[in-house]
C-alpha cells in the first residue's frame, strides 16, 4: 500500500488537502501520539493512582508492575490489558466520569489542532471515522468524541461489563497486530486511510490503502521511510 507521495508539508492545510483529495470512505486513527501528544493510557494510570482510586495493596502492585513493564519484563499487550482489568469491581459510570475529567484536564490541551480539523472535514464529507487504541476505552471514548468519532466506533482495550460494573474479563487489547485484527473483526473492510505514530501501528498502517504516519517515534519513522509512506509532523510539534 502507498500513500500520497510527499512526506513534507509546509502547512497543515497542505496535509489536510492531500488526505481529502483521496476521497476516503473509511478512516481509522490511532490516538495517543496521533490525535493528541500524550500517552493518555500511562497518564490516566498515574492520575488514578494519585487520587487513591485503588486500595493500597493494589496501588503498590500496580506501581511495581508498571516499572517491570518499563524495564521490558512485561509485554506491551500484557500491560495494556492489566491496566484495564485492575478496575474490576468499579462502576463504569464512575470510570467514565473520571475519564472525562482526566481528558479535559490532562489531554485536551495537547490535542493536535490540525488532526482535529482533518477529522471534522472528513466527517463533513461523509467519511466513516474509527479510533483504535491500546489505551482503555473510557479515556479513548472521552477523547474520540471531540474528533467526531462516536463511542460505538472506538476499538480500545476494554473488559466485559456486568450490571454496570467492570469485570476482569478482557474483550480486546488492540496493540500491535491486534489493531489490524480488531479492524478486520469489527469493521470488516480495509481502511481507505489510516493514521498512526508508533511501531505498534505498523500492521494497521500496512492494512490501509493509504497509510499516513503522524508524529512518528524513531522506529516507525524508519519503517515509513523504507516503505515510502507519507510522514506528517503536526504544526505544534515543530515549535
Image (cartoon, rainbow, N blue to C red):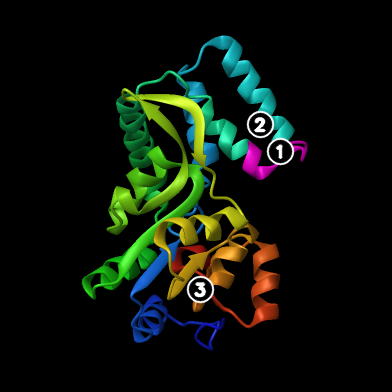
- First to last magenta residue range: 71-78
The image shows residue 35 at horizontal and vertical percentages of: 43, 58
User: In this figure, which residue is indicated by the disc labeled 2?
Assistant: 66
**Marks 1 & 2, CB-CB < 8 Å contact:** yes
Residue 60: % across, % down: 63, 17
The residue indicated by pointer 3 is 208
Residue 139 sits in which quadrant?
top left
Q: Is residue 189 left or right of residue 150?
A: right
For label 1, the SS is: helix
Q: Judge by depth and name the residue closer to the eye, 38 or 142.
A: 142
Residue 70 image label: 1
Among numbered discs 2 and 3, the one appearing first in the sequence: 2
Q: In whole angstroms, how far apart are the C-alphas of marks 2 and 3?
A: 32 Å
- Select label 3 or label 1 by which is in front: 3
How crowded pointer 2 is (Cα within 10 Å; few <14, some 14-19, many 20+) is rated as some
Residue 239 in sight here: no
Amino acid at each position: 500500500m502507498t500513500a500520497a507521495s510527499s512526506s513534507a508539508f509546509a502547512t497543515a492545510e497542505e496535509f489536510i488537502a492531500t488526505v481529502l483529495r483521496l476521497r476516503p470512505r473509511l478512516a481509522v486513527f490511532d490516538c495517543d501520539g496521533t490525535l493528541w501528544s500524550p500517552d493518555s493510557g500511562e497518564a490516566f494510570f498515574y492520575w488514578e493512582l494519585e487520587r487513591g482510586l485503588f486500595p493500597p495493596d493494589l496501588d503498590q502492585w500496580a506501581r511495581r508492575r508498571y516499572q517491570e513493564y518499563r524495564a521490558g519484563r512485561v509485554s506491551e499487550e500484557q500491560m495494556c490489558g492489566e491496566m484495564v482489568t485492575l478496575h474490576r469491581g468499579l462502576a463504569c459510570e464512575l470510570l467514565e466520569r473520571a475519564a472525562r475529567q482526566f481528558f479535559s484536564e490532562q489531554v485536551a490541551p495537547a490535542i493536535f489542532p490540525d488532526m482535529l480539523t482533518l477529522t471534522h472535514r472528513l466527517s463533513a464529507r461523509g467519511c466513516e471515522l474509527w479510533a483504535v487504541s491500546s489505551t482503555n476505552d473510557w479515556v479513548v471514548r472521552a477523547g474520540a468524541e471531540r474528533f467526531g468519532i462516536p463511542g460505538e466506533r472506538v476499538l480500545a482495550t476494554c473488559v466485559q461489563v456486568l450490571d454496570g460494573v467492570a469485570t476482569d474479563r478482557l474483550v480486546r487489547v488492540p496493540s500491535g497486530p491486534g489493531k489490524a485484527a480488531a479492524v478486520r473483526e469489527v469493521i470488516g473492510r480495509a481502511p481507505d486511510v489510516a493514521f498512526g505514530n508508533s511501531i505498534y501501528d505498523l500492521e494497521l498502517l500496512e492494512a490501509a490503502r493509504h497509510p499516513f504516519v503522524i508524529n512518528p517515534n524513531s522506529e516507525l519513522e524508519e519503517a515509513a521511510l523504507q516503505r515510502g509512506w507519507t510522514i506528517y509532523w503536526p504544526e505544534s510539534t515543530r515549535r
